[in-house]
Amino acid sequence: MNWWRRLFSSGQLEQELDKELRFHFDQQVADNIRAGMTAVKARRAARLAFGGLNQVKEDCRESRGTMWVTSVAQDIRFTLRTLRRDPSFTIVAVLILALGIGANIAVFSVVDTILLRPLPFHDSPRLAWIAGNNGTGALSDTTFRVDAYEEIQRQSQSFAEMTAYVPFFASSDAKLTGIGEPRVLPGVWVAGNFFQMLGIQPQLGRLFTPEESVKGGRPAVLLSYSFWQRQFAGNPAIVGQAITLDNRSVTVVGVLPASFDFGSVFHPGVKADIFVPAVMDSIRNWGHMLSIVGLLKPGVTVAQAQAEADVVYPQIKAAHPEWTTDLTVKISGLKEYVSGKLRRSLIVLWCAVGLILLIVCANLSNLLLARAAARGKEFAMRSALGARRSRLIRQLLSESLVLSFVGAALGLAIAYAITSYLAHQGSIGLPLLSSARLDASALVWTLLVACTATVFFAIVPTLRMSAVNLQESLKDSGHGASAGRKHDRMRAVLVVSEIALACVLLVGAGLLLRSFLRVLDVDLGFEPSHASAIKVDFDDGGNPARRGAILKEMLRRVSAIPGIEAAGISDKLPLDRNRSWELRAKGRSYPKDANQDAFVYIVTPGYLDAIGMHLRSGRDFNWADTPTSQPVILIDEAAARRDWPGQDPIGREAQGIGDGVTRVVGVISDVHDSSVEEAANPEVFVPVTQGSPEGGELVLRSKLAPGALAGSVMSTLRSMNPGQPATEFRPIQQLVDHAVSPRRFFVLLVSIFAGLGLLLASLGIYGVISYSVTQQTQEIGIRIALGATQARVQFRVIAETLKLALIGIAVGVVASFGIAALISSLLFATAPTDPLTFACMILLLVAVALIAGYLPARRASRIDPIVALRCN
Amino acid sequence: MASKFDLPQGTLDLLILRVVALGPIHGYAIAQRIQQISRNALQVQQGSLYPALHRLQYKKFLAAKWAESETGRDAKFYELTARGRAQLKSETESWARLTEVVALILQDPQGELS
């Protein structure tokens, strides 16, 4: 009979034990009678020979090796009874634990999702990201031309395979017609082997075949799972059918699995509904088009691949003098590329919840110590009745464990709510967040956190309580002064450390918050409020003159709508997608490897006003800038500084934009176009009549809400082009919000944690001060009887509070300087020693401490001396 | 009956194994047998037999089954398993060695107190 069966069939074992011992006893009695004893004497002799029946039974049970389980169960039953007797303590303790543990699990899930878990691809540790231009600059810098992609694919020894996609999504968006209103679908062009290399199996149908990736091949499309659900209600019959994309009939060859989320890995915040094979021959001459992902050969490291690339790629470049840019690449693990930038922020977040857990533990310790004082007699009594110390410790630990686990269960529910909320926040520009969930590792983490927390908060009170001094506890009448002294010191230490921890959290959160406010305060170079954009569709047949005429008329009609203050069109929006070309001042000589990239926007007259950019000097474009007139450009101040330092660029000639020489006609203020936090880049604006725009974004400036405008704008657009797809107005603010969303995310979480820490610390202060007031009831009563005023009594209590708070703050501030230095790289335009933040947070803590101390102080001052003195 | 002595620690298991080795037997009979063989010289609380029996059973040195006893009542009969037999053998050997060594030391004239 094995251990488990012994554990679970204890009833049967008991019966058998009984039967066996009874048999022995009866047998003995019978023998004794046979030997000539009377029945009474025989029984007595048998009992004597046998020994204590209950002791024997207990020893037999012990021999099963399952006793400890039974006694643990007993402990737990007893614990539940004890806890139920003190519901307010239990509820507070469980809630505090649930908040602390819940926050920890939620952050762990996020960290696990973004940092720890491998990417959801086959052999993901071998996947590498290959970025051009040493991985710096705009998208046009870090991408590759098709020839270069094919060449490095052929010559690299480090990679088993490479694949690519086109990250310039404006090219790959496609207009869906024939099903309801025409709509623009966000799409991605991917190399034919993209899904095969990543190990993505289609949910339905098949992946692309090689014939579908060549010029003139059969047009094919793969649908994302969510688009398939939304558009086709998950109907499997769609596979094999044709849909109309950009007026071409394209066959749906398959549906990708729900687990594949292109945007969340490669471009957080970008949605991709359809995937189309990139036809390399069609885009061969489009310049830098491809982002490359490589699959390292087994055993080859990223560093080895980089070393090879450093030697081989320049040779490839040397063999192709027609390529205009160097082939210098930075190779990093794909995981590193996707989430490496977030590592520091996430670790800070992780530490913040760790601090929360410490505060929670200190708080719980405190509560338990307060309870210990109240239960001193109970334990003294039990120990007097023969309970061993180990038994008392076990009892106390099991109480703590039960609290922890109930707290952890509730914490899991909180964490579940948080992670599912976060997973559905598509607007947060954090990679992989959409796959955040509570999985097995989160459960293991929960267990770990709950157990660690128990050890932290239970050890001190347990040792304190189990080491009862019988005499003193039983003698002590309860209101005496001496009994609690040691407890009091311990509790004061705990409160001081709570305040110190809360101080560190608050300062950290304060610095991050201030950085965030600074980021929001950045002069973007355009006015996001009251501006919104809508994607417009027009058919110019590639004729710039016709394009000019269509867009001029479109803007005229849209501007006539009441409430519209300004309207203009650009093919790209700031902080959205970008593209860069080279810009050089004509006649100036540049060092050979100078980076002359500038972001390029192809815009209509009026766009500057609509988006709210400021013209510093010169003029805006007008409709007199035609395909045949002098080619003109606008530049921003960053470009002026770089290419015409110390000169007035107006009227100067530039090269690199378009085919020949262009003339600078205006300069605008710097625009933050790729990141809010980084310095502005050189920018160039080209009139729509002199460049070829990739699509068009109609930007409207209006005090009216986008929703109020949508109807009239859409009908105006439809009046010109019935095929105008139905798309949503995008507030320009949304672009800014998305750009700062990772920072907002971290600031929000850290601030919530700091608030939680503050709340817990104030609870701790309140608990300790309130307890000490209760203990000193008599003393205070005597003081009042002797003539102490209410104010005097309050002052004493508040002074005690302040003493604790100030010690805690002093320790906390010193620690904060250290922590602040550690997070300095996460700060923006804020010194890690920012005096304002420190001062505010200290004041906040003092204020909260005062409030927490005031409540017991008020109670103390209202003590009725007669009642206080009589109650003993 | 005057010179009863307590059983040295751990030897009860050995005695039980020895007794059970003779064939299936129930607890009461084991107690009787030990008493008889030792000619009542051993002071064994009969009750303490049972925890030892159960421990040996859980260690799989003994197997137990319920069967009818000589008086017609159901009793729990123990018998030696293969493991128990091996255990008995090694325990017996080490007991013999132990007593031999102890006897040797006690008989050593050099060690006698003068």
Image (cartoon, helix red, strand yellow):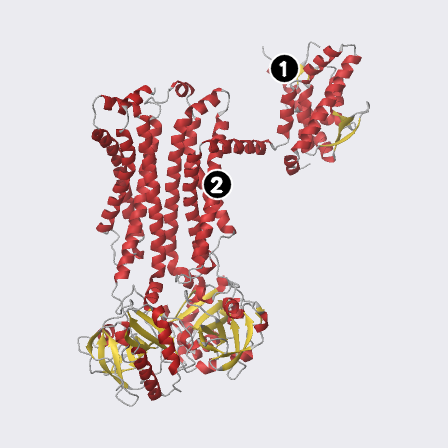
The answer to which quarter of the image holds residue A640 is bottom left
Query: Where is residue A799 drawn, in percent x and y?
Result: 23, 33
Query: Where is residue A767 drawn, in percent x and y?
Result: 34, 34
Which numbered marker is on residue A488? none
The answer to which quarter of the image holds residue A487 is top left
Q: Amino acid at mark 2?
A: Val
Q: Residue at x 52, y 34 (%)?
A: A76
In the rendered view, tell whether residue A305 sits above or below residue B20: below
Regarding mark 1 in the picture, which secondary structure is present there?
helix
In the rendered view, tell whether residue A725 sits above or below residue A369: below
Which numbered marker is on residue B109? 1
Same-subunit check for callouts 1 and 2: no
Label 1 and label 2: CA atoms lie apart by 71 Å
Q: Residue at x 41, y 45 (%)?
A: A99
Q: Amino acid at mark 1?
A: Pro
Regarding mark 2 in the picture, which secondary structure is present there?
helix
